[in-house]
Amino acid sequence: MNAPTDEEGYLVNPQDWSEDIAAQFAQQEAIQLTDEHWDAIRFMREFYAEHQVAPDVRFVMKHLGQHRNRVFELFPYGYVKQACKIAGMKRPRAWSTG
């Protein structure tokens, strides 16, 4: 991976993100990306492009529909630790939902 990461492995610059980088991060987290993972990740990227901030987990949960804990089934070690990292977000400083 050519993109710089911080000491916790998050991208320093979210614009460096690519699907290849996401696949590498997912592999590091022992996550096999499915269509449902990609749906969540692409939603997060679109939200970031529009708002220049990572979406709160509630927005991702609403986007996925189904039952409310699906995000945490897809990313079992947490929204910030896995979903935000794989989607190329900077690590949120204060986050109460994951």
Image (tube, helix red, strand yellow):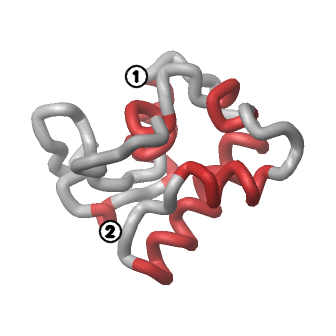
- Choose the circle earlier in sequence order: 1 or 2: 2
Picture coordinates of residue 65, whole percent (x, y): 84, 51
Residue at (63%, 24%) from the top-left corner? 32
**Dot 1: within a 10 Å radius of its alpha carbon, few (fewer than 14), some, or many (20 or more) residues?**
few
User: Which numbered dot is residue 15?
Assistant: 2
Q: What residue type is disc 2 on?
A: Gln
Picture coordinates of residue 9, whole percent (x, y): 23, 35
Question: Compared with residue 49, is residue 61 higher up or lower down, i.e. above or below?
Answer: above
Q: Label 2 near label 1: C-beta < 8 Å?
A: no
**Dot 2: within a 10 Å radius of its alpha carbon, few (fewer than 14), some, or many (20 or more) residues?**
few
Q: Quadrant of residue 59?
A: bottom right
Which residue extends farthest front?
96
User: Which numbered dot is residue 4?
Assistant: none
Taking 85 as reference, is 22 left or right? right
Picture coordinates of residue 37, whole percent (x, y): 68, 41
Say which residue label 1 marks: 28
Taking 6 as reference, is 73 left or right? right
Whole-number angstrom distance, CA of label 1 to CA of label 2:
20 Å
